[in-house]
């Protein structure tokens, strides 16, 4: 099991994503894949070092519209 996201929480999040109205099936599938990836993760996120400025930029400077957010994904 993941050190980041346990099975029960993962299932709840995926169920919520599937049941919510999303304008884009692509975005919905992307979110489900992301949640599943966290569930399968070995917990290595603690190894990623970030400064307060980086955290602030990531959380506050990106668009909140899911379709616009996809533009930031390579």
Image (cartoon, rainbow, N blue to C red):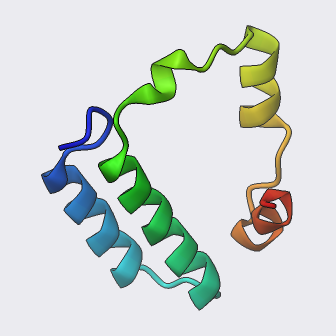
- Residue occupying image coordinates x 51% and y 67%: 31
Residue 60 in picture, x, y percent from top left: 78, 34
Pick the residue in front: 28 or 64.
Answer: 28
- In the image, taking residue 71 as reference, residue 58 lies left or right, namely left
The quadrant in which residue 48 appears is top right
Q: Residue at x 82, y 28 (%)?
A: 57
**In the image, farthest residue toward the left:** 8
Left/right of residue 66 with respect to residue 10 in the rendered view: right
Q: Disc count in the image?
A: 0
Q: Residue at x 37, y 43 (%)?
A: 41
In the picture, which quadrant includes the C terminus? bottom right
Q: Position of residue 17 (x, y in %)?
A: 40, 73
Figure quadrant of residue 12: bottom left
- Going by the image, does 31 lie left or right of 10? right
Quarter occupied by residue 50 = top right
Q: Nearer the viewer, residue 39 or 63?
A: 39
Is 27 rendered above or below residue 35?
below
Query: For the point 82% across and 54% down, which residue is it?
Result: 63
Image quadrant containing the N terminus = top left
Q: Nearer the viewer, residue 43 or 51?
A: 43
């Amino acid at each position: 099991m993941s050190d980041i996201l346990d099975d029960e929480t993962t299932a709840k999040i995926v169920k919520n994503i599937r049941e919510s109205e999303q304008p884009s099936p692509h975005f919905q599938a992307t979110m489900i894949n992301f949640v599943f990836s966290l569930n399968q993760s070995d917990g290595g996120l603690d190894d990623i070092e970030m400064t307060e400025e980086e955290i602030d930029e990531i959380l506050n400077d990106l668009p909140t519209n899911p379709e616009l957010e996809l533009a930031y994904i390579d």
